[in-house]
Image (cartoon, coloured by chain):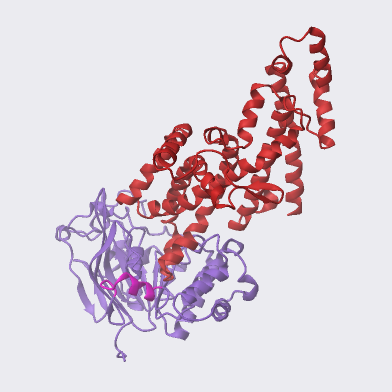
Amino acid sequence: MTIFLVRRLMHSIVVLLVMSFVVFAGVFAIGNPVDSLINPESTQEEKERAIEQLGLDRPLLEQYFVFLKNVARGELGTSFVHNRPAIKLILERLPATLELTVAALLFAIVLGVPLGLVAGLNPDTLIGRGILSSSILFFSLPTFWVGLMLIMVFSVDMNWLPTTGRGETVDLWGFKASFLTLDGLRHLALPAVNLGLYPLALMIRLTASGTQETLPQEYIKFARAKGLSPTRIIFLHLLKNIMIPIVTVVGLQFSVLLAFAVVTESIFAWPGMGRLIIDSINLLDRPVIVAYLLVTVIVFLLVNFLVDIVYSTLDPRVRLSGL
Amino acid sequence: MRSVAEPTLQVTDLRTHFFTRAGLVRAVDGVSFTVGRGEIVGIVGESGSGKSVTGFSIMGLIDSPGRVVGGRIAFRGKDLVALAEEDMRKLRGNRISMIFQDANTALNPVIRVDTQLIEAVRAHRGVSVDEARGIAIEGLKLVGIPAPEKRMKSYPHEFSGGMRQRLAIALAFVNQPDLIIADEPTTALDVSIQAQILHETQKLCRERGTSLVWITHDLTVVAGLADHICVMYAGRLVESGPVDDILDNPQHPYTCGLIGSIPSVNSRKKRLFQIPGTAPPLLALKEDCAFRERCPRASKTCAKAPPESKLGPRRMVRCFHPGSDGDDRHPAPAGRRAGTLPQ
């Protein structure tokens, strides 16, 4: 376990370093942020002063090392646009995005696994086929269109759920959380469903195919030969075996959703990181972009770490030290 | 009370067919045999002879597209074919249990051994988890697994092949069934381990009066184990009888061939006998004797399916030309032996 932790930590640092340089160089190559930041009416002198002030006149590598030095002190730079620490901007909005992502994933798992089981156990029935066909629909419908339709149906026509914002929030360990109030939950529902539709389809397909692969296994037949009840066979012997691919995909999807929440956040005016990063890219607000990506990669790494831990508890043949 | 004479298992004219897309497969087609209380019956046959399907039919574990289409499986007088699934489930693992061919794939790889043992006990007996654990540990001791309390916490992959099969045998015995069906449980093991497992299973059955059906492709395995032997070929019994009678006085040319192909001390330096050809695909079965193509005694009569001839109370052969003469092992006319080596 210790070896695993140390090795994983070292991997993570390397990944972060490489990633930060790639992003740094990438944003540098796109263009000079000064062009979009400074009033076009300003004089050449004012312009040069601003460039000097932001440190943009120095060569790329030097800027990068200054950045690294600051990171080592825990500073990720100040936003060119907002003139506030970039990391603060990100962390203010991270909880909202995390909340949305987790809610979407939960929706996908809680609905997708049972539906997938039903489809996998009854592949030749109307219900089984119906579930699998509808999952294709969830795969293919574009998020922005589904979002608009959800608003049309549930907000405009039926007037059940609100369309924008997080609603009433509660302070939870210094962060705002929507899911603890009824109003917050009502605000969370539509964006979570919208974002969760794609992973829902994934869960259904994955569980269904896993079920169909596991059912003909000898150990399922042996469990039946022991005279176990069908419930126990399905919920212990079968489900535990198909949990491994499911956990893998949940881990991957978590990261993907975190990054792709942008569309949903825009449609439902959800105050998450998505909007911030889009604006920052438009204005080439490098500190914010880099800080955003660093935070995202750290979340990726954490999730992968958790997935590996869960693996080792699900499948005893997985040794953590070998990962 | 059931009478002393009532056999533990009486299979009559069992037919299990598979309705595949390619056509009807008569995997088991009219098999009858009896297993007395505490008796060990060996079912011998090559791959595809229907011996495993016979075992799974008794367990009620034939899956679609297969189905038991006819016959009777009387277990202590009760017909299992007609039994509802829920009642059958209560018998499985309880009164009738099964040892699978490969314990490596039969035990669930991601569930601890103690869980798999305890659930087997608790599925049929209203005991607490602790009591079930005690019963399970006793079971492991019985099959000679060292330090059972410690090994209970292991996963199947942490056991060696032989230990894993012992585990499967412990699972089969744990509810003290009346009948155990063993589907080639020693095939995947070393010869020395195989002998240990055979010996211990036999001992356990004798001690507890458990009836045993041992399915195998290896005649030598059942020769030392069984009381009674059934030889299967292409879904049918071709010969059955008490073990000594079958070995000393085989009647069916297939049985003669099987016995002839066992290496012995006397046959050193001679080329080992082999039955020419391979078993016919079950899809292509016609109305003739299925062994005809490979049989040295085949004649025109064999174009019809041979009937069962009773040679004694529990002695049967299905052949138009029964006999135990050694002629079969001599070279046959040219052409007939195509595909075999010259002798």
Visible in this render: residue A240? yes
Q: Which residues are magenta?
A: B80-92
Of all chains in the rendering, the one displayed in purple is: B
Q: Quadrant of the N terminus of chain B?
A: bottom left
The chain letter of the red chain reads A
Q: Residue furthest top?
A: A44
Report how many numbered discs are placed on residues in the image.
0
Give A193 or B93, whichever is nearer the viewer. Answer: A193
Depth check: A299 or A283 in front?
A283
Residue A136 vertical position relative to residue B80 in the rendered view, above or below: above
Q: Nearer the viewer, residue B237 or A215?
A: A215
Measured along the vertical axis of the image, is residue B321 above or below residue B25? Answer: below
Q: Is residue A263 left or right of residue A135?
A: right
- Left or right, B201 with respect to A33, comes to left
| Residue appearing at x 73%, y 40% in the figure | A12
Q: Residue at x 83, y 32 (%)?
A: A70
Where is residue B191? Give x, y as percent.
53, 66
Residue B166 % position (x, y):
53, 71
Residue A156 x %, y %: 42, 38
Question: Residue B110 lies in what quarter of the image?
Answer: bottom right
- Is residue A188 shown above or below B129? above
When the figure is inspected, residue B223 is found, relative to residue A100, above or below; the finding is below
Is the C terminus of chain B in the top left, top right, bottom left or bottom right quadrant? bottom left
Is residue A5 in the magenta section?
no
Would you identify the image quadrant in which residue B279 lies?
bottom left
Q: Is residue A245 visible?
A: no
Decide which of B28, B60 is in the foreground and name it.
B60
